[in-house]
Image (cartoon, grey):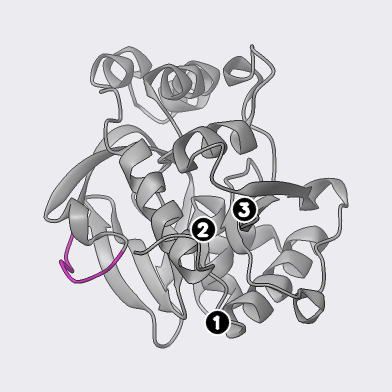
Amino acid sequence: MPKPELIIVKTGRAVAEARGDGRDFEHWFADGLGRDLFDYRTVSVDQGEVLPPVDSLDHAPAVLVTGSPAMVSDRLDWSENAAAWLAAAHNASLPILGVCYGHQLLAHALGGRVGPNPAGRRMGSVTVEFSDPDDPLTGPFVPASSFNVSHVEVVLEPPAGARVIGTAAHDAFHALYFGNLAWGVQFHPEFDRDIMKSYIQARSGPLEAEGQDPSALIGALDANPNGRPFLARFAELARAVAGADPA
């Protein structure tokens, strides 16, 4: 049986400090999902690459939407085009996982509201409180798990019909289930400690200007032990939909 396809909607590049070995978001995600479990197709929408029309797909690929240095609230043309595509993919019940910018973009695509976090920039390891033990993706991580975060904007108002399945101290809508096999999470399951450290170092100036201590944030980092199991769980669900594995 051929491998199921997973489309990585790449919405930007990681900071240069984290790409010293030439690897970027798509590589980190493939590591967590399982390099041999999917045929990966990366579409760099921020660079003008075009996603295939959803109605032209003769199978049901899974979709993962990456983080980005861009802001959803800027409504850039490529971002709005990607949002329209995600709305169509959601309507077609393709399994979708939106991460950070991807989480926000999916919420925006489905009618939610995204903007600057009233609590300000957040970086480092945080505790995410998951609330639904029956959710097929986040249920195994109830009640609380540590993940790494790096963001300025958040979902301020979920779209109609979305269910809150995870919160953080600084973000009431940290994880959402949008229905139709689509989830969004504000945290970065693909970030290990070294990647997170690189991000904090790259943003040390803005962090200090905002009254935060980069050294303390780095000192409080953990290894993000839940990141890869979280991605592996999404891989299980996506492969089950494709008929490759039982859920």
Q: Is residue 134 magenta?
A: yes
Q: Position of residue 119 (x, y in %)?
A: 33, 49
Which sits in the foreground, 221 or 139?
Answer: 139
Quadrant occupied by the C terminus: bottom left
In this view, 18 is above or below 54: above
Toward the left, the furthest residue is 143
The residue that disc 3 covers is: 3
Left/right of residue 191 with respect to residue 48 in the rendered view: left
Residue at image position (63%, 52%) is: 71
Residue 230 pos. (x, y %): 34, 47
Per the rendering, the mark at residue 98 is 2
Mark 2 secondary-structure assignment: strand
Residue numbers of the magenta segment: 130-136
| Neighbours of disc 3 within 10 Å: few (<14), some (14-19), many (20+) | some
- Name the amino acid type tagged 1: Gly
Q: Are marks 3 and 2 in contact (CB under 8 Å)?
A: no
Label drawn at residue 111? 1
Spatial separation of the CA atoms under disc 1 and disc 3: 33 Å
Residue drawn at (47%, 80%), measured in percent from left and top? 180
Residue at x 51% of width, y 32% of height: 31
For the residues marked 1 and 2, what is the alpha-carbon distance in whole angstroms? 15 Å
Q: Secondary structure at mark 1?
A: loop
Q: Where residue 139 appears, x then y in whole percent? A: 21, 61
Relative to 209, 102 lies left or right: right
43 and 146: which is toward the camera: 43
Left or right of 162: which side holds 10?
right
